[in-house]
Image (cartoon, grey):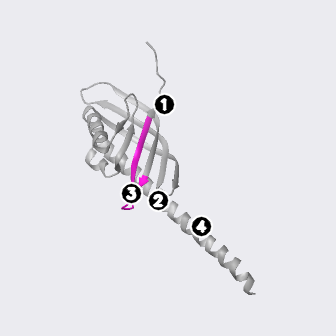
Amino acid sequence: MRRYRLPFLCAAALALSCVHATRDAHGNKAVLDRIRHEIQAVEIAGSTESMRVHISDDVVMMAPNMPPVAGAENAMAAMQQFFDAFTFDIEYKSEEIAIGGDLAFDRGTYRQRLTGRSGSAVVDETGKYLWVYRRGTDGTCKQARVIWNSNQAITSN
């Protein structure tokens, strides 16, 4: 009877660790869902101050039609220029979240309507995004890499 205890205990420990990992992944997915909804709301409001809490100090932002922007302060300055130029409505839809250790990503699509503050035309756009998160030493997940681009085809004149 004793020789069966060790395999049973090992199997039980493995099963419990899988349950814990599943709960942890599910909990982290809920955190990333919450962050996505908060970012959507602060972008609509045009608030870089509220957005900054979700951005790592060493973030790299790769927006369409511009060079990459490195560092939180530079990324927030670029976003503030965008918020100063446009009002917009945006909706994000996550299609995949993957979590591994201290890194995670959220990949999905967006739909936005941009209206120039100077009275310029309204632009409706769809696109895709990839947000890479890193868990900090304080346990919070923050965006470390932010990438998005349009689905609209480039036209030649």
Q: Secondary structure at mark 2?
A: helix
| Relative depth, front residue between 40 and 69 | 69
| C-alpha gap between disc 1 and disc 3 | 33 Å
Which label was assigned to residue 28?
2
Q: Nearer the viewer, mark 3 or mark 2?
A: 3
Asked if the residues shown at circle 3 and circle 4 are in contact, with their CB atoms under 8 angstroms apart, the answer is no
Query: Could you say where residue 78 lies in the image, as x and y percent from the top left?
Result: 29, 36
Query: Could you say where residue 88 lies in the image, as x and y percent from the top left?
Result: 33, 36
Question: Looking at the picture, does residue 155 appear above or below residue 25?
Answer: above
| C-alpha gap between disc 1 and disc 4 | 39 Å
Q: Magenta region, mostly helix, strand or loop?
A: strand
Question: Looking at the picture, does residue 155 appear above or below residue 1?
Answer: above
Residue at horizontal 48 percent and vertical 56 percent from the top: 29
- Dot 3 or dot 4, earlier in sequence: 4
In the image, residue 94 lies in the stretch drawn in magenta = no
Asked if the residues shown at circle 2 and circle 4 are in contact, with their CB atoms under 8 angstroms apart, the answer is no
Q: Which residue is mark 4?
A: 18
Which label was assigned to residue 86?
none
Name which quarter of the figure residue 121 lies in. top left
- Dot 3 or dot 2, earlier in sequence: 2
Q: Nearer the viewer, mark 1 or mark 2?
A: 2
Q: Nearer the viewer, mark 1 or mark 3?
A: 3
Amino acid, disc 1? Asn
Name which quarter of the figure residue 137 lies in. bottom left
Q: Is residue 98 left or right of residue 68?
A: right
Asked if the residues shown at circle 1 and circle 4 are in contact, with their CB atoms under 8 angstroms apart, the answer is no
Q: Which residue is mark 3?
A: 136
Query: Could you say where residue 72 lies in the image, as x and y percent from the top left?
Result: 31, 44
